[in-house]
Amino acid sequence: EEISIIQATAKDYPALMSIPWFGNDGYVRSTRLLEEQPDTALATRHFCTYAGVTKSDVYKKFEEKFVPKVGYVPGTYACYLYDSIWIFAKAILETGSTDPDVVKEAIPKIAASYFGASGWCNLNEDGDRAVSIYNIWAVYDPGELENPEDYEWLYGPGSEEYGPGKPNWVLAGVYDPLSDSVTWYVTIPAEVG
């Protein structure tokens, strides 16, 4: 959450306030940034990447079961955790063993053919996901976008934090690793400053 302090310090430097800022999942969708530095965060946009999920039928079924139990829509890490547990369980079942070395050996093969709540779970040689969708979130004011109700917001319509004059995190675009392209939902280049 140091981004709020960094942003507060940067407001006195016009060169820093005249360009878009780029971040990562370390502070993406930071509520503290919106609470403490709404105007300066809006001025610099803060385009941040955040691993995404494939919005498939499998995801929708998981979401339908998840929301009533926990009260909110599952995020990326909840989907990744859910899929990890299933891959681990399948590895135990397929090997008939609980020996960590045996199970560990089976996990890449299981993951390569597993499509879960987050999408395809194939792993690379380092044991990380081979490919991942990345959502790109940025700070916008709902009042500056045409049809703001058509966007995905951190604070959506109906919440006290949503509306014109209230900077908010919006899903600004999505990077698809299969096509190596970004689909932007906002106008790029973004107005800043």
Image (spheres, rainbow, N blue to C red):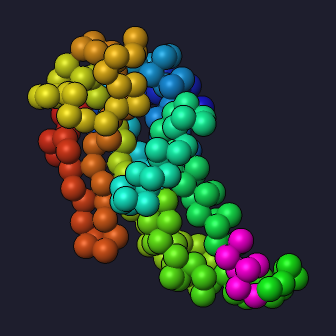
**Which stretch did the figure color magenta?**
89-95
Q: Residue furthest left?
A: 146
x, y percent for residue 7: 47, 27
x, y percent for residue 187: 15, 42
Q: Residue at x 68, y 64 (%)?
A: 85
The vertical placement of 14 against 177, above or below, is above
Q: Is residue 15 left or right of residue 187?
A: right
State whether the magenta stretch is mostly helix, strand or loop: helix
The vertical placement of 81 against 87, above or below, is above
Q: Is residue 90 left or right of residue 130?
A: right
Which of these two is toward me, 81 or 177? 81
Q: Residue at x 54, y 23 (%)?
A: 32
Instruction: Say which quarter of the image contains residue 176.
Output: bottom left
Quadrant occupied by the N terminus: top right
Instruction: Say which quarter of the image contains residue 55.
Output: bottom left
Which of these two is toward me, 71 or 54? 71
Q: Residue at x 67, y 76 (%)?
A: 90
Q: Is residue 2 visible?
A: no
